[in-house]
Image (cartoon, rainbow, N blue to C red):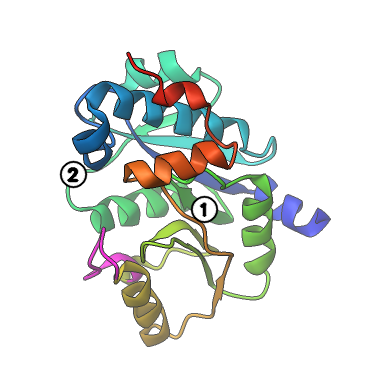
Amino acid sequence: MPSSINILKSSAILLFLKAPRRGHVKTRLAHTTGPERALKTYRALVERQWTQLPDHGQIEVHYTPNDADFEMRQWLGDAHGYYPQSEGELGVRLEHSVECAFARGAKAVFCIGGDCPKLDQSHLEQAAAALEQCDVVFGPCEDGGYYLIGLNAPHPELFKDIPWSSRNTLDSSLKKAAELGLRVQLLETLYDIDEITELKRAIDDGHLPPEIMEHE
């Protein structure tokens, strides 16, 4: 996909991540696995995602809490940009980060997290190719959210009045995009990891190491 690679070269890929702190990541998963295994899962997910990022394009880590800069650099290295997320709900943070990435000169912006065990470079290339034909591209999650959003211009209204972390997140976002007159394309539907059944699925699929389930 040479054209999609050219788009990625002039784009920014924003990873929305939390500092890898026990008790602060994968809290739903921790209810069944315990906080230590939840932290191990989170680190494995993000590190897998890190290996799947394209060599071309600007990689930005947007982290929380805002005192975690040194911690994140120690974990993921100094090769990319690090930015604290703004205060507020997810929509506010997405809106701010996207607008700042465009202000820094990105021609397209892609936002992802670290929770999706199958998201790889091919999905980012497909998203970049889709933006040649549309205004916004979503990667749907099985739980009703989305694992990726790509835009070729800032559309702040797209992040307002959305029920985040619900089964209606994507549907509400699609409705908002239609109201704004934006052309939309969807990638394949994937799953992310919030429950132990999804963790076991990712291990069975070979996307995460089985050692995660070993007793401490």
44 or 169: nearer the viewer: 44
Q: CA distance from mark 1 to mark 2?
A: 20 Å
Element marked by disc 1: strand
Q: Which residue does the numbered mark 2 point to in the structure image?
A: 87
- Left or right: residue 63 versus residue 185 is left
The location of residue 142, given as percent across then percent down, is: 43, 62
The location of residue 47, given as percent across then percent down, is: 51, 27
Residue at screen point 28% across, 37% down: 26
Amino acid found under the numbered disc labelled 2: Glu
**Residue 67 shows in the view:** no
199 or 151: nearer the viewer: 199
Q: Quadrant of the C terminus?
A: top left
Residue at screen point 27% across, 21% down: 36
Amino acid found under the numbered disc labelled 1: Phe
Q: Earlier in the sequence, mark 1 or mark 2?
A: 2
Question: Magenta segment: does it hold 35?
Answer: no
Q: Main secondary structure of the magenta part?
A: loop
Q: Which residue does the numbered mark 1 point to in the structure image?
A: 110
Residue at screen point 53% across, 80% down: 183
- Left or right: residue 96 versus residue 125 is left
The location of residue 172, given as percent across then percent down, is: 31, 76
In magenta, the rendered stretch is 158-167
**Residue 74 shows in the view:** yes
Question: Magenta segment: does it hold 161?
Answer: yes
